[in-house]
Image: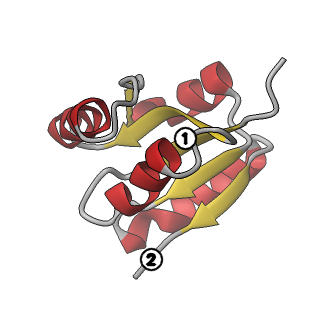
Amino acid sequence: MTDKKRYVLVGTGGRAEFFYGALAENFRDKSELTAFCDINQTRMNYANQLLRDKYQYPEVPTYTSDRFDEMIETHKPDFVIVTSIDRTHHKYIIRAMELGCDVSPRSR
């Protein structure tokens, strides 16, 4: 059994690397990034490439935004980090809380 906290990240655009990079590099002994969610598969692929090449961290499964509930059910995260475009934060925050997750919205 592990004491690591499980995280998923919603929104893999410009500000997202600040969060998933920290999880993969500085906090890997206490945390586990388990999935990405975004409307854009290309951004998620790029984020996974950075995880692998820059941080030597295993790639994580990706979910398009219409599969958000499936991601939560599959990975059962302790925390959901929302870095999607600001106008969509509420959608993911509310739904994650309804599904029993702790949520951390992150803006600039």
In front: 57, or 76? 57
**Residue underneath mark 1:** 8
Q: Is residue 29 left or right of residue 25?
A: right
The location of residue 77, given as percent across then percent down, is 68, 36
Residue visible at 46% across and 29% down in the picture? 67
Please provide percent x and percent y for residue 27.
59, 48
Residue at 62% across / 32% down in the picture? 72
Residue 24 appears in the figure: yes
Residue count near mark 1 (Cα–Cα under 10 Å), binned few <14, some 14–19, many ≥20: many
**In this rendering, would 14 be left or right of 27?**
left
| Circle 2 crowding by C-alpha within 10 Å: few under 14, some 14–19, many from 20 | few
Q: Amino acid at mark 1?
A: Val
Instruction: Classify 108 as above or below 22.
Output: below
Amino acid type at circle 2 is Ser
Near-viewer residue (29 or 33)? 29
Q: Is residue 8 above or below residue 49?
A: below
Against 75, residue 105 (above or below) is below
**Mark seen at residue 107:** 2
Q: Residue 57, image x and y in percent?
A: 39, 30
